Image (cartoon, coloured by chain):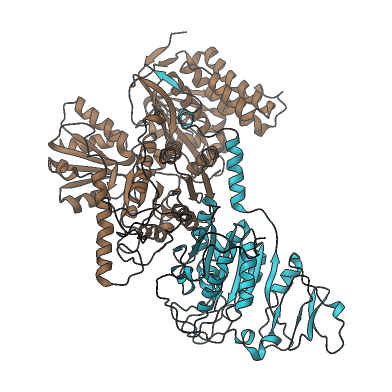
Chain colours: A cyan, B brown
Amino acid sequence: MATETQTPLFTSKELVTDQEVRWCPGCGDYSILKQVQTVLPDFGRPKEEFVFVSGIGCSSRFPYYMETYGMHTIHGRATAVASGLKISRPDLSVWIVTGDGDALSIGSGHFIHLLRRNLDVNVLLFNNQIYGLTKGQYSPTSEAGKVTKSSPMGSVDHPFNPAALCMGADSTFVARSMDRDPKHLQSVLKRAYGHKGTSMVEIYQNCNVFNDGAFEIFTEKGSKKLETLFMEQGKPLIFGENGDKGIRLDGFKPIVVDIAGGASANDLWIHDETDRVKATILTRFFDNPVMENHLPRPFGIFYTEERGTYEDGVNEQIERAQQKGLGDLDKLLKGRETWMVG
Amino acid sequence: MAGAQQLSSVVIRFAGDSGDGMQLTGSQFTNSAALIGNDLSTFPDFPAEIRAPLGTLPGVSGFQLHFSSEAIYTPGDICDVLVVMNVAALKVNIKQLKDGGTIILNTDGFDPKNLRLAGLTEETNPLNDGSLDKFQVKQIDVTKMVRELLKESGLGVKEIDRCKNMFVLGLLFWMYNRDMTPTIGYLEGKFGKKPDILKANISALKTGFAFGETTESFAVTYEVNKAILPKGEYRSITGNEATAYGLIAAAQKANLSLFLGAYPITPASDVLHELSKHKNFGVRTFQAEDEIAGIASAIGAAYGGSLAVTLSSGPGIALKGEAIGLAAMMELPLVICNVQRGGPSTGLPTKTEQADLMQAYYGRNGECPVAIVSANGPSDAFFAVYEACRIALQHMIPVFCLTDGYIANGAEPWKFPKSADLPKINLSFTTEKNSDDKNKFLPYLRDEKLSRPWAIPGTPGLEHRIGGLEKQAVSGNISYDTDNHEFMVKLRQEKVDRIADYIPLQTLDSGEEQGDLLILGWGSTYGAIKTAVKQAHNEGKKVSHAHLRHLSPFPKNLGEILKNFKQVLVPEMNNGQLVKIIRDKYFVNAIPLNKIQGLPFKVDEIKQAIEKFV
């Protein structure tokens, strides 16, 4: 894994473009941009090898603000554009910047195929549970009953659980972070870069204009410790004001136990990000925090797996074919059977 | 037995159930005609269903082959010989047989069950009702003979029945004095790992040949000598093969990797199949999850520096519309192959049509001109797609290459080029900053072609962003400036128009440079128009023929050519598309001649139209 800090070939400042950033003041996107610009120099890779590919939506303006190569494509198709780029240019570090509408609504068809194919790209899914650029309609991650411009009586849509969807699509790296926790986001971005395969990072991002406070229960001081569960490899699942609560598995059923109240720390669930079944259960920690006895919302790496990448498969076949001899155009044009005239 | 009778030209149509192997029989006979040196042209005509119910009319699959000792350009209007495996095949195809023509039929396919499936009774059985009196009918119980022949083979009845087509092929090989060896070689390749099936097929083939020799009803054999074609080495090629080879050749000549992003669709899939076989040329084929991903991946590959191609047919092209607009805005090289079929919607998937010209011209949101070329026949698809690649790469623009189902599946002899004789495709990636002070990279700074530089990721110092939002001229930054938008819309049009400075002038295929009637064609109508015009010339009629390779932009002298004729007739397999563009652009009296039956024009249909004017 290339997560360790290497000699920077450029600075974070050099990643800032001459374009005026046009997100609304106070938007969570600013923080995400900053964290990406902060970690990129640590990867020890020249700036020209990074390509940011986006679709359409507020988040998709991202490439214009990164002084790297970039493409701002069409709605929902960034994953497909990035696939063609990565297959033909495996030498590049390809990043997809997308949102809940872009990736999970209009682009959901491409999104799941990217995950199953496992191209070695990084997906930053800015989830703000709302359509911002079109000014405030419910999105595929908006909670049921949400009142928006297009759902004045409340949305009757059942929302996607993005992390669970990714597990269902055989993603090889599933993580969640948030705009309001720069250090955590940076550490997850580094892990995403180090993973060979499609790294899917869902980022809870506040839209302060159309859906302000959607995640504040997870991001703000008063409730964060009680409502969030920061997963760390090999460590017990602990949360709470003073780390006094834990998660224990009762069969396949996760239950909250009170460590302070005498529950044994030895019985706690030890996080293993390579365990598919347990990761699947963790992604299902998706209760509405207003429910009684709800589980905390996990952040960090749910799951990671080493699996061959699509582009390696493609290029291995090309190498194998070429070992038998490079293509000869004259032979190709001649074909198997010919005849002479005259 | 009489000696072989010399013929200059023969049209055979093979027809049977989809599962009877008629396409294989036809293509093997084609191969033999090719190897003997006949000129030839084929027309596979098959149903959309893979296996429609046995014995029914919708399940009939046909293959028409025209082979000749003279130069020919079409698969023939009507056939001389009709081979039918059942009564449904006869019913569907009998209209295509000329009076006095020969029918070779499998009597087992005329039993009560097959009659019922074809909607006939014993009373209306064509074998008894006199309707075939004007033809020479050869009745053979192929099913019975093949079953008898192979009863000891150890194969089941189903497998034995699948050898019927080889019996028929053997018989025709005898009738036309053909060598069986290449077909035996083909069978060995195909069934090498299944010796029982191989043996049965060869046995059926040889028995069919021997049957012809020993049966009195086939007293005459025929010979069609090799055609006098331009000297050289030839091969047989289909349009889809030629398209695939043209793409590979262009990538080789441009020294780029070839990337195809595509989703399977009839009748284009064979290009994907063919390209996926040639990984030794570094070809990357990406079978995407849908049509949009097909083109989107190609756009990604184009940005990365590949010769990027997407491939589809009409319905798929409709889905790609928004992404074509993106490629036009990003000004990336992209080749879009459209193997047209009958539309709209799912339409006639296995039938041919030229009804996507307007889609290629206008089928996107906003003002979105692109370049368009078309192929006029199977082997010409090689040169058409090669030209599409050249334009895309040298002008940084999306280019349509239009073929159609008739071109895609049809085969003809091809005097294939040597790679050294193909024009080189010069291009280079930009590696230096290009502003006046060499301090900045300006991705939309243009050259004399109005083409912008192609700087690919990995190039130090040239980091830049492109996208679908309107661009500021030169810098390529996002711009919502109203005047800039108008300027850019006109500039993108001018960029397409300026391609006309870099393509050949239009020439006449035949006829005088001025006169009463010009036939202006595009695409696969070429063969029928050429033949009809040739016949008209033989009758002393004055008519000229021009056939367009470049549809957008048109060659610079097209307007002048058109104005030298009193009338311009535009035959198209659509409801009149090129004709509208021609009228709009040149204000000439262009008259449509349309056929929208999912079938190519017959020579006679063009000829009759000529006679109305001349």
Residue at 33% across, 43% down: B374
Q: Position of residue A102 (x, y in %)?
A: 50, 69
| Above-or-below relation of B258 to B214 | below
x and y percentages locating residue A123 in the rendered image: 57, 66
Tell me the residue at 25%/39% (across/down).
Answer: B504
Residue A112's quadrant in the figure? bottom right
Can residue B124 be seen here? Answer: no
When the figure is inspected, residue B225 is found, relative to residue B462, above or below; the finding is above
| Residue at image location 60% in from the left, 35% down from the top | A323
> Could one spot residue B404 in this view of the protein?
yes
Q: Name which residue lies at 42% across and 11% down.
A: B4
The image shows residue A339, relative to residue A81, as above or below, that is above
Task: Give the farthest residue toward the bottom.
Answer: A222
Q: Position of residue A124 (x, y in %)?
A: 56, 69
Foreground residue among A139 and B59: A139
Residue nearer the viewer, B439 or B547: B439
Q: Is residue A114 left or right of residue B252?
A: right
Q: Indicate the quadrant containing the N terminus of chain A: top left, top right, bottom left or bottom right.
A: bottom right
Say whether residue B322 is left or right of residue B519: right
Position of B381 with respect to A262 (left or right) is left
Quadrant showing the C terminus of chain A: top left
Q: How many numbered circles are shown?
A: 0
Front residue of this view, candidates A134 and B439 = B439
